[in-house]
C-alpha cells in the first residue's frame, strides 16, 4: 500500500527489479554510466554522502544502497528512511542496510507529501534521482520543486539536503561524447524526464527553500549540498 496516495505510472519498474539492482546496477549504472556517460566521478558522490548524511536520514531513490553501504562506520545513520516509488529498491536496499541502521521503508511518490514528520530529519539525499522524475505543471526542474520543498519541510533547522542530478543544459554543464545521445534515448524510453532541466533552474529552486547552497558541476551532473 503506498504511503502517500496513489503512485504515478512509471515505465521504469523493470529497470529497478531486485535482480537488476543486485547484479547489474553497480557495474552498469554506477561504474560505467556515471563516469563515462555523465562525467561524474564516483569519488565525488562518495564525498557527498560523507558530507551530508546525519543520524536521522532519508534517502530518496536508494537504488541498491551502494553509497550508503560504503560510508565509514562513524558516518552511518542510526535511523534510515528509504523512499521510492518502486518496491524493488526498497527491498534490496533495506536488506543490505538493516544490519547498519534502523531502517524504515516508504513506498511513496517523491513529489507528493512524504510520510515523515516536519523537522524530524538531520539529512536527506536524492542522488541521481531528479532527472528520472516527471515534471509537473511546468517543464524542467521547476516542475519537480515539490521534491525540494518536501526535503526542506522534513529537515530540522540546519539540516542538510544533498543530491546529484543529470542536467540537459545551463552554465558549466559539459556533456561527454556519448552523453547527449544516451540522454535523448532515455527520455524517449521514459526512463528520464530531463530535457528541460537546467543548472539555473535547479539552483533557483534550491535557493528558494534553503539558506545556504553549494552547487558544483561535473560533466552533465550537478552536485549540491544545501542547508536549511
Image (spheres, rainbow, N blue to C red):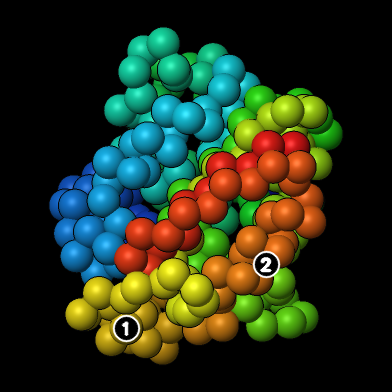
Q: Mark 1 sits on what residue?
A: 180
Measured from the top left, where is residue 221 in percent x and y?
41, 62
User: On the picture, is 134 further left or further right than 70?
Assistant: right
Q: How many marks?
A: 2
Which of the two residues, 208 or 67, is positioned nearer the viewer here? 208
> Where 100 sits versus 214, above or below?
above
**Residue at the (30%, 28%) spot, across then down:** 70
> Where 141 sits versus 67, above or below?
below
Which element type, helix, strand or loop, lies under badge 2? helix
Q: Is residue 73 at all visible to an observer of this figure?
A: yes
**Residue at the (43%, 83%) spot, across then down:** 187
Measured from the top left, where is residue 166 in percent x and y?
43, 66
Q: Are marks 2 and 1 in contact (CB under 8 Å)?
A: no
Measured from the top left, where is residue 11 in percent x and y?
46, 75
Q: Earlier in the sequence, mark 2 or mark 1?
A: 2
Q: Mark 2 sits on what residue?
A: 144
Point out the image quarter for the C terminus. Answer: top right
Measured from the top left, where is residue 38 in percent x and y?
30, 66
Q: What's the CA distance linking mark 2 and mark 1?
A: 21 Å
Which of the two residues, 111 or 122, is positioned nearer the viewer here? 122
Which element type, helix, strand or loop, lies under badge 1? helix
**Residue at the (48%, 79%) spot, across then down:** 169
> Where 22 sits versus 40, above or below?
above
Amino acid at each position: 500500500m503506498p504511503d502517500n496516495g496513489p503512485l504515478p505510472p512509471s515505465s521504469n519498474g523493470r529497470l529497478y527489479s531486485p535482480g537488476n539492482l543486485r547484479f547489474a546496477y553497480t557495474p552498469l549504472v554506477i561504474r560505467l554510466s556515471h563516469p563515462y556517460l555523465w562525467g561524474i566521478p564516483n569519488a565525488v558522490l562518495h564525498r557527498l554522502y560523507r558530507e551530508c548524511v546525519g543520524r536521522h536520514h532519508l534517502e530518496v531513490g536508494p537504488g541498491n544502497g551502494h553509497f550508503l553501504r560504503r560510508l565509514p562506520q562513524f558516518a552511518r545513520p542510526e535511523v534510515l528512511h528509504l523512499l521510492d516509488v518502486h518496491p524493488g529498491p526498497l527491498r534490496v536496499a533495506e536488506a543490505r542496510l538493516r544490519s547498519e541502521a534502523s531502517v524504515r521503508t516508504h513506498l511513496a511518490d517523491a513529489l507528493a507529501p512524504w510520510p515523515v514528520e516536519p523537522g524530524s530529519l538531520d539529512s536527506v539525499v536524492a542522488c541521481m534521482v531528479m532527472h528520472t522524475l516527471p515534471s509537473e505543471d511546468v517543464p524542467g526542474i521547476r516542475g519537480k520543486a515539490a521534491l525540494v520543498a518536501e526535503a526542506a519541510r522534513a529537515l530540522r533547522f540546519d539540516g542538510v539536503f544533498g543530491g546529484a542530478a543529470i542536467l540537459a543544459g545551463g552554465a558549466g554543464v559539459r556533456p561527454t561524447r556519448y552523453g547527449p545521445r544516451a540522454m535523448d534515448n532515455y527520455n524517449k524510453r521514459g526512463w528520464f524526464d530531463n530535457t528541460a532541466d537546467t543548472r539555473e533552474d535547479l539552483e533557483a529552486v534550491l535557493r528558494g527553500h534553503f539558506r545556504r547552497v553549494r552547487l558544483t558541476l561535473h560533466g552533465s551532473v550537478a552536485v549540491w549540498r544545501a542547508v536549511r
